[in-house]
Image: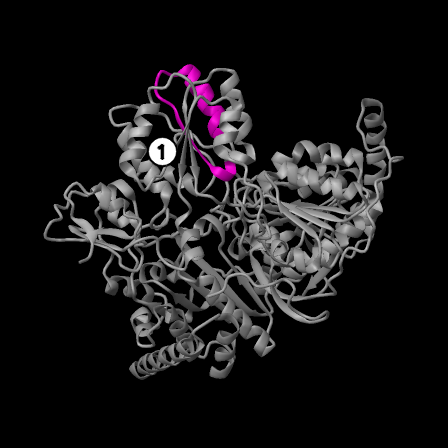
């Protein structure tokens, strides 16, 4: 049994730390894990990905159409890698956008959010899209946006771990503002749970 | 969130999460090293960084050396005194260290010496994707290749044993995917160096010609012995997928990981000979493996090194087996592999599938690209902008160098006309200045200048070359994670250290007048560059301003006051977006905005706006 999780975002968004939280989860749950990371030049504001794989795995690489979960920290980057999703996969998308320099320089437009989500929906029936950055402002700590996203990951039930396990993992990785981050987790969990239930009813 | 964790975590026998590079560092401190050196470079950097943080606690010496050659030589010194030493570098760094490495195998070692080469198939952070397994053959140095974080740790310990057994340095070769994979690693006991250093004057550690000739023959004997050790090594082992089978795979490094998963996914029955001790190859074991198989696929990223040697073995031993790989078109020598490539190659080789199932293109929906860019407030952006203004109407050629500032070759600056390897900006500038009438302006970073730029400047002075050298001094080795360098006033452990002055170095070499500019002061910077364009000898301008990222980390706040655009004044001329390329400034159609979360308040956009539309929000 393998669980494949693909992270996509922009360098500087804290994707490595997010991966580390999911890594700690493996220790807590006594699962095997491999994490593939991006370091170096690509981190300088460029498109960045990471992978987390649980179970009997040998390589951190995830094949196209094999991801159980796509966690997108930015809508354009989520759409860029949507093909990684398996037909039963779930996409979680932070809709807060970061405009790439190529858009500014070439006088083009950043694609409409609905168009980006439509691309993702071609690969997945369940797309949990919401503005995690704005939600994090509710706990008065914008950097907690990724903890909101961890909450959303927990709500998908794709990883064999309880909410408490996730919270333990957050405590191990987050250096400060633990309460704010745990509150942010709850916010993300509740939002994602509602969206996923609504998708289930719609089918 | 915190980035680096300590490699000291975990009691012996426990599983901990470690990055491949961290596992290598852990293996070193479990081997009782007395000394570790490196020059930072992706994908090797985290080996040195994690050792730097714990060196004083564990009690070994660590340094960020000025370059890879010196790093290796310092490690050799420790080895000659009988102690264990490790040095790590990226693949192209081994080219810098190669002069020492290729004779070191003749010289032999005393205390165990391990050199880690982190290769970069697909050039994810590099100027080439050279295959450093060639160095094992070229230098005559045994090589181990891990496939997992656990093997990273285990193989370092084995490498130290082997090194002392053979009196040879041993290379560990990783790739980006191995170095930058995190997994569960069972750790052992951390061991301090317990040896007393002693230099043995009776050992012939000097390569005068008669000694060198004899040492070469000794090296060949050592490599024969190494081949026997490879044959009996548990690092070379057979892994069965499914039932007994006449089909085989011989694989190393990341190629093994993809092989086993892709075979399982396809439901193949196949035996995989995993090669961990990859030079010398385990000839006898390979021969017996080939003899039991009808078809064998060789899986190795980049060059067909094993493939050619294995084909030769089969030929010499007259073994009736079909060997598949790059020679038969099943794989390319380009880039890195993945599960899809392996699935395609395996079905083609063993299931009569059709070849050429290429990985689909990565951006099917024609979405805007997002390449890496210089950070908000980056002093390099300001310097490039000043050069652009100062050289208006001229047609300068811009040789550039390796670092964050390499991004100056991209939009909107386009100031990288030639870029090759560390330190090459200067030598190329000198040749260009002798052959072209145009102004030549070379860029080099501070760390790169110390690394390999200095001989270029010495050459320029003595041979009367005429060009402008701009040293982009951001007070750190920024691209690889802000490591200190000889110009820093702290050492690897953050203790006070004498800083080697760029000005005094250049003046000592004989530069007439070293100019220093602050790139955040655009007006002055432009004036100085214009003046220097008139100079008749080599000109050195130091553009000095600390990396905006490190400045913010050290002071816990942004550089200045955040800027915003007054939309009632903005004429939408595009100067800010097209001039500076700052990721905090964006344009959507006709809408210009400064992102309040991204802006760090460097004030440069404020200085360049011709309509005074940018300023501090009232």
Quadrant where the C terminus of chain B sits is bottom left
Q: Nearer the viewer, residue A165 or A183?
A: A183
The residue sitting at 26% across, 57% down in the picture is: B595
Find residue B307 and report its image quarter: top right
The residue sitting at 68% across, 43% down in the picture is: B306
Membership of B362 in magenta stretch: no
Find residue A154 and report its image quarter: bottom left
Residue A110, compared with residue A23, is above or below; it is: above
Q: Where is residue A176 in the image (x, y as percent from the top left)?
A: 46, 72
Residue B132, compared with residue A76, is above or below; it is: above
**Residue of label 1:** B415
The residue sitting at 32% across, 24% down in the picture is: B531
Q: Position of residue B432 (x, y in %)?
A: 43, 20
> Horizontally, is A138 left or right of A151 in the view?
left
Find residue B499 and report its image quarter: top right
Q: Is residue A172 visible?
A: yes
- The span picked out in magenta is B424-448
Q: Where is residue A1 in the image (x, y as percent from the top left)?
A: 56, 73
Residue B169, compared with residue B415, is above or below; it is: below
The residue sitting at 69% across, 54% down in the picture is: B248
Q: Mark 1 lies on which chain?
A: B
Element marked by disc 1: loop
Q: Is the magenta stretch mostly helix, strand or loop?
A: helix
Membership of B439 in magenta stretch: yes
> Horizontally, is B412 left or right of A156 in the view?
left
Q: Callout 1 environment at 10 Å: few (<14), some (14 to 19), or many (20+)?
A: many
């Amino acid at each position: 049994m393998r669980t494949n999780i693909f992270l996509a975002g922009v360098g500087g968004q804290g994707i490595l730390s997010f991966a580390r939280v999911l890594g700690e989860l493996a220790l807590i749950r006594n699962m095997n894990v491999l994490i593939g990371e991006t370091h170096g030049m690509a981190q300088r504001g460029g498109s960045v990905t990471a992978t987390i794989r649980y179970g009997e795995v040998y390589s951190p690489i995830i094949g196209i159409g094999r991801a159980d979960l796509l966690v997108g920290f930015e809508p354009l980057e989520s759409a860029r890698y949507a093909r990684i999703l398996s037909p039963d996969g779930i996409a979680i998308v932070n809709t807060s956008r970061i405009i790439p320099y190529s858009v500014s320089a070439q006088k083009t437009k950043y694609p409409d959010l609905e168009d980006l989500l439509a691309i993702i929906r071609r690969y997945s029936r369940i797309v949990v899209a919401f503005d995690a950055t704005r939600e994090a402002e509710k706990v008065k700590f914008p950097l907690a946006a990724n903890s909101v996203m961890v909450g959303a990951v927990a709500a998908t039930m794709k990883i064999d771990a309880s909410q408490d396990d996730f919270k333990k993992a957050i405590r191990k990785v987050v250096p400060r503002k633990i309460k704010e981050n745990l509150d942010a987790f709850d916010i993300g969990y509740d939002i994602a749970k509602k969206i996923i239930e609504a998708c289930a009813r719609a089918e | 969130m915190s980035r680096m964790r300590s490699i000291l975590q975990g009691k012996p026998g426990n599983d901990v999460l470690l990055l491949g590079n961290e596992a290598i560092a852990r293996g070193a401190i479990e081997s009782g090293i007395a000394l570790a050196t490196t020059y930072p470079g992706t994908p090797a950097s985290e080996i040195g960084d994690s050792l730097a943080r714990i060196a004083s606690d564990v009690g070994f010496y660590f340094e960020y050396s000025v370059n890879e050659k010196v790093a290796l030589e310092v490690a050799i010194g420790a080895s000659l005194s009988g102690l264990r030493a490790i040095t790590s570098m990226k693949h192209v760094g081994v080219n810098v260290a190669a002069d020492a490495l290729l004779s070191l195998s003749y010289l032999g070692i005393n205390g165990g010496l391990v050199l880690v080469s982190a290769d970069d198939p697909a050039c994810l952070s590099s100027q080439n994707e050279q295959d450093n397994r060639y160095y094992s053959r070229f230098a005559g140095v045994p090589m181990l290749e891990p496939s997992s974080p656990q093997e990273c740790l285990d193989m370092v310990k084995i490498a130290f044993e082997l090194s002392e057994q053979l009196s040879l340095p041993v290379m560990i070769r990783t790739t980006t995917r191995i170095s930058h994979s995190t997994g569960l690693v069972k750790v052992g006991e951390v061991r301090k160096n317990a040896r007393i250093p002693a230099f043995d004057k009776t050992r012939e550690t000097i390569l005068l010609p008669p000694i060198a000739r004899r040492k070469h023959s000794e090296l060949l004997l050592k490599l024969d012995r190494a081949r026997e050790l490879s044959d009996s090594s548990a690092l070379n082992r057979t892994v069965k997928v499914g039932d007994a089978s006449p089909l085989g795979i011989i694989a190393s490094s990341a190629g093994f990981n993809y092989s086993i998963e892709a075979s399982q996914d396809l439901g193949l029955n196949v035996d995989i000979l995993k090669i961990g001790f990859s030079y010398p190859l385990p000839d006898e074991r390979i021969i017996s493996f080939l003899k039991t198989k009808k078809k064998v696929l060789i899986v190795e990223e980049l060059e067909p090194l094993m493939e050619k040697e294995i084909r030769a073995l089969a030929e010499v031993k007259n073994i009736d087996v079909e060997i598949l790989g790059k020679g038969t078109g099943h794989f390319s020598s380009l880039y890195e592999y993945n599960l899809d490539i392996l699935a395609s190659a395996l079905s083609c080789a063993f299931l009569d599938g059709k070849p050429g199932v290429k990985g689909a293109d990565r951006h099917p929906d024609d979405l805007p690209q997002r390449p890496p860019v210089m950070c908000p407030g980056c002093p390099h952006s300001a310097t490039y902008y000043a050069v652009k203004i100062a050289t208006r109407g001229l047609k300068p050629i811009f040789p550039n160098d390796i670092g964050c500032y390499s991004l100056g070759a991209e939009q909107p600056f386009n100031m990288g006309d030639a870029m090759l390897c560390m330190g090459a900006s200067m030598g190329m500038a000198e040749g260009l200045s002798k052959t072209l009438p145009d102004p030549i302006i070379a860029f080099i970073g501070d760390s790169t200048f110390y690394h390999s730029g200095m001989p270029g400047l010495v050459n320029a002075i003595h041979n009367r070359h005429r060009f402008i050298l701009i040293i982009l001094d951001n007070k750190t080795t920024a691209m690889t994670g802000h490591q200190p360098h000889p110009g820093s006033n702290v050492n690897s452990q953050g203790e006070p250290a004498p800083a080697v002055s760029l000005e005094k170095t250049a003046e000592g070499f004989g530069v007439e007048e070293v100019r220093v500019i602050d790139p955040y002061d655009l007006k002055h910077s432009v004036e100085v560059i214009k003046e220097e364009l008139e100079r008749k000898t080599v000109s050195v301008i130091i553009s000095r301003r600390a990396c905006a990222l490190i400045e913010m980390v050290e002071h816990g706040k942004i550089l200045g006051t955040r800027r915003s655009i007054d939309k009632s004044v903005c004429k939408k001329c595009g100067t800010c977006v097209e001039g500076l390329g700052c990721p905090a400034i964006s344009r959507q159609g006709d809408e210009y905005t400064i992102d309040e979360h991204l802006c760090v308040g460097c004030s440069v956009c404020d200085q360049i706006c011709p309509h005074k539309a940018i300023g501090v929000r009232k």
